[in-house]
Amino acid sequence: MTINKPALASVAALALVFGLAGCSSSAEEPEKTEKPVSSSAPETEKPEPTDEAEPTETPEAEEETGGATGDTAAPGTTVAVGEEAIVSWQPSEDVPAQPVGITVKSITPASIDDFAVVGADFQAQLEGYTPYYITVEAKKVDVAGGKLANQALYGDMGAVDADGRSMQTVSIIGSFEPCDTSSLDASFDEGTPQTFCYIVAGPDTGDIGGATFEPYDTDFNDNPVIWNK
């Protein structure tokens, strides 16, 4: 939905997208939610044959900790709010996958009154629903990797309710003081941690279970990383 006439002139540039119809009733796994996507090695010489084959070393299996294998979290990893999970994130086909550290700092219930600046029509749609503000800190793990400035990490974040069902995301384009969603800026590529906020909503009859990292059309879409509330 798009709000063309917000209540206050100071927020005339705000546009709102909010969908309530896609809530799943299945408690077994999060509902698949489509999210927009912004979108040869050189030949080496063969070694000379030797009389005896040299034994090859078998690398030790990488230790799994908290659902993560190696340097990045595997699909289905669960951590607590306040803990960091390093994920392999590819925001678009033009950008190589990058390790990014994500820490969900807080999950806070919001008031419908906060959305008065967006418009009374939208507030009416929120009746029966509880919105939540989710604050995230992200940092680039490999500063020598591909550029991530201007990419929208928030677009690959979401939430599940206490029964594991996907919650609806609420997108406000423009400045919204209670929860300002923003893309990563140039300092992110220099290793500076960045904080952003995004909004989700679920029925008043339930509770939020946690925040998720669930990029569309990846293994995380069906089996997200979850920061348990």
Image (cartoon, helix red, strand yellow):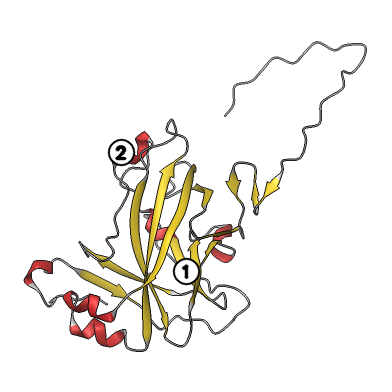
- Say which amino acid is labelled 1: Ala
From this view, report whether residue 63 is shown above or below residue 107: above
Q: What is the x, y in percent for residue 203?
A: 43, 84
Instruction: Tell me the quarter of the image containing the N terminus.
Output: bottom left
Q: What is the x, y in percent for residue 167?
A: 45, 75
The residue at 48%/79% (across/down) is: 207
- Mark 1 neighbour density, 10 Å: few (under 14) some (14–19) many (20 or more): many
Q: What is the x, y in percent for residue 54?
A: 87, 18
- Mark 2 neighbour density, 10 Å: few (under 14) some (14–19) many (20 or more): some
* Residue hosting label 2: 187
- Location of residue 114 (image quadrant): bottom left
| In-front residue for pair 228/92 | 228
Q: CA distance from mark 2 to mark 1?
A: 27 Å
- Say which amino acid is labelled 2: Ser
Q: Are marks 2 and 1 in contact (CB under 8 Å)?
A: no
* Residue hosting label 1: 159
**Disc 1, SS:** strand
Left or right of 99? Residue 111 is: left
Q: What is the x, y in percent for residue 20?
A: 38, 82
| In-front residue for pair 2/42 | 2
The residue at 42%/36% (across/down) is: 146
| In-front residue for pair 84/10 | 84
Left or right of 15? Residue 132 is: right
From this view, report whether residue 124 is shown above or below residue 183: below
**Disc 2, SS:** helix
From this view, report whether residue 55 is shown above or below residue 138: above
